[in-house]
Amino acid sequence: MSGIGSGLGTLGPGDPRLPESRNSKLLEPLRAEGAKGVLVATLSTVIVLGIIVLLVLRSPGWPAFKEQFLNGTEFRRSFPDIAHAFLLNIKYFLIAEPLILFVALLLAVMRSLPGPVFFPLRLMATIYVDLFRGVPTLLVVYILGFGVPSLGLSGVPNSAIFWGVVGLVLSYSAYVAEVFRAGIESVHQSQTAAARSLGLSRWQTLRFVVVPQAVRRVIPPLMNDFISLQKDTVLVWIIGGTPEAFGMASIYQTGDFNFTPLVGAALCFLVITVPMTRFTDRVLASQRRRRQSGAAL
């Protein structure tokens, strides 16, 4: 028997050579330990949250805080207008995001081009990325929203909304370009060499081999940038655009000296950003499982 065991190797839990009943008995302690860990984590979380809620509710300033931030009457009065204004935030996001993806991918490709002949393109892309990553997005929106219209150039739009969205595109393109560039550089050189050996040109290799793989690898960080962009759409109103969710909430807050409308605006953003965050987590988990299954093969 020992000879057979040594020839087959060591049998462990889950080994198909073990009887099913034997597998179940070996896995029972692991399942019990996992269930115990989940129970302990759940109880500790409930206890900590309960203590925090109790401390807040029993604090001396809770009645005033509730009146200022959680006023039900003020919420019901202001939230319909805030929710309707939030459609502008979604509109700005849907306009800016495709432009950001296009400009960012172009910049990433320019920065990844090898050889001295493409040095001017690499230099221009590097200056662009360094400039707009180094300047806060709020300042970019301010400079464009107030500076360009004041020039009085013929044929150039003077809309604050237009230049606010342009500011978001310019700023976020620099960040997303670095995400794309990281994805492009993560593609192994053997992929490029194999494509070139098959007769593909440099541009065909980028288009059909490198870029598709790079985009798939950077989807999770791209989703994080999407979440940040959705929140930063409030900057368009700051330079004089039509009031969106935050702008409408600020108008109500200024008129009533109550902060509940701002909480309503925060809820609008949470309705969008939380599902996007959970979707990002699922994408990350899916990619992790694919990598693990590929490594196992």
Image (tube, helix red, strand yellow):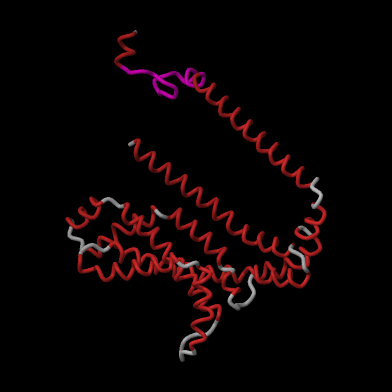
Q: Determine which quarter of the picture holds residue 288.
A: top left
Quarter of the picture containing the C terminus is top left
Up-down relation of residue 86 to residue 160 (above or below): above
Q: Determine which quarter of the picture holds residue 5.
A: top left
Task: Look at 47% across and 44% down and name the residue there.
Answer: 285
Q: Nearer the viewer, residue 133 or 33?
A: 133
The location of residue 63, given as percent across then percent down, is 82, 54
The location of residue 83, given as percent across then percent down, is 68, 67
Give the magenta-colored segment's residue range: 8-25
Task: Look at 57% across and 63% down and name the residue there.
Answer: 231
Q: Is 12 inside the magenta-drawn segment?
A: yes
Q: Nearer the viewer, residue 274 or 154?
A: 154
10 to the left or right of 205 = right
Residue ranking furthest to the top = 1
Quarter of the picture containing the N terminus is top left
86 to the left or right of 113 = right
Up-down relation of residue 19 to residue 290 (above or below): above
The location of residue 270, given as percent across then percent down, is 62, 57
Q: Is 53 inside the magenta-drawn segment?
A: no
Task: Look at 49% across and 90% down and name the residue there.
Answer: 152
The location of residue 217, given as percent across then percent down, is 38, 52
117 to the left or right of 254 = left
**What main secondary structure does the magenta stretch of the protein show?**
loop
